[in-house]
Image (tube, rainbow, N blue to C red):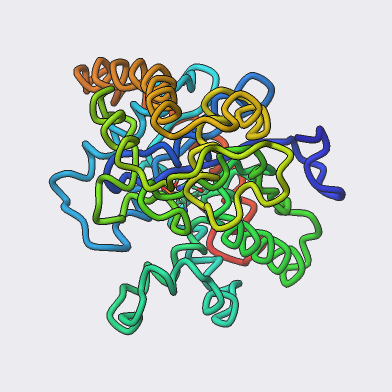
Amino acid sequence: MSAAPTPAYAGPSRVFSGMQPTGGLHLGNYLGALVKFVRLQDQHECIYCVVDLHAITIEHDPKLLQQQCREVAAAYIAAGVDPKKAIVFVQSAVPAHAELAWIFNCVARMGWLERMTQFKDKAGKNAERMSVGLFDYPVLQAADILAYRATHVPVGEDQKQHLELSRDIAARFNNDYNAPNFFPLPEPLIQGPGARIMSLRDGTKKMSKSDPSDMSRINLTDDAQTIANKLKKATTDSLPLPAPDDPKRFENRPEVENLVGIFAALAAKSSDEILQEWQGKGFGAFKPALAEIASQKLSPIADEMSRLLSDANALDAILADGAARAHAISEPVMKDVRRIVGLWPR
Ligand code: TYM
């Protein structure tokens, strides 16, 4: 990440990201985003949110939502986010998100949202019956980021289009309200071997919480036996692992590419280095080795998560402190926004 946030923006560089509390987190969330959250916190001001307002865009159980928020917050901390350094909080505890989302609703254009592929994927043929909130989801995401004038956003590759929309909204606001560089144009931080982890059953589909088959993903809370079993049953073929210098090494083998990529991301190596070690060998040996490194990385996180979740009061105190610190950053931004837009001061 470069020291200068965006060419003309003069504010400090600041990192913001979030995850939805809709079901447990999986290896894609961990390698695509969480690993970067931890890495960035030493050099940057970081704000990590649990986005419960996004979670209510689809059907949800109100009785479970608060606990699901605690689980995501516990996963952040268990994976290594230090809540004394980084700000960890729940979105609905800070009013700026919803308020700025409304203002951005009046900046964003229907055509921009109609192009969002995630809505099309989630809604399928049922777009007419989806909530307006699901359609508007990426506008709220822009508000999350820009309420803190965040400059960098660590996410997986699936969020690229949403980040482009955030930049379009920021630019349009700055332009329409004649407030040059008021909002930075946030940059996605996507690079890295874990940016796009695919399903264990189908290497052309991303690993996802919403996949009906639990065998398609490794959850952060899966135990060693479950991880080994899921990897054992993961789709592969009967050919050996290819050589790193074979130009066709992953041709028509998306599942093989995915497992090698997962191994590389977990071992903090490149896919070529993994193939160097494993070329010519079969999956009968590769899969147990992959299961071992996966449980080595994930089981301490699962243990720490359950420790954190066993003391909900302590966790809630961390989240309350995070919300107060987040509010202290976003409220001055919102004061300026209200003034720029001509709204009533508070
Ligand atoms: P969510 O909750 O779907 O996913 C959280 C993070 O995990 C990444 N991710 C993946 N990375 C690699 N491979 C995968 N298979 C995979 N699946 C998920 C996502 O890219 C994401 O970084 N819209 C966001 C939440 C959000 C947000 C924000 C993010 C709301 N406001 C502001 C950044 C900034 C989402 O749905 O994440």
Name the foreground residue: 245 vs 28: 245
Return the x and y of residue 133 as percentages of the image width and height. Answer: 37, 68
The residue drawn where x is 44% and y is 70% is: 119
Name the foreground residue: 249 vs 13: 249
Give the vertical position of 177 relative to 87 (above or below). Answer: below
Name the foreground residue: 21 vs 95: 21
The residue drawn where x is 60% and y is 40% is: 242
Q: Is residue 138 left or right of residue 133?
A: right
The residue drawn where x is 58% and y is 51% is: 157
Kindly indicate the quadrant of the structure image that contains residue 268.
top right
Q: Is residue 104 visible?
A: yes
Q: Is residue 178 left or right of residue 311?
A: right
Q: Quadrant of the N terminus?
A: top right
Return the x and y of residue 134 as percentages of the image width and height. Answer: 38, 68
Q: Is residue 96 visible?
A: no
Return the x and y of residue 294 as percentages of the image width and height. Answer: 41, 25
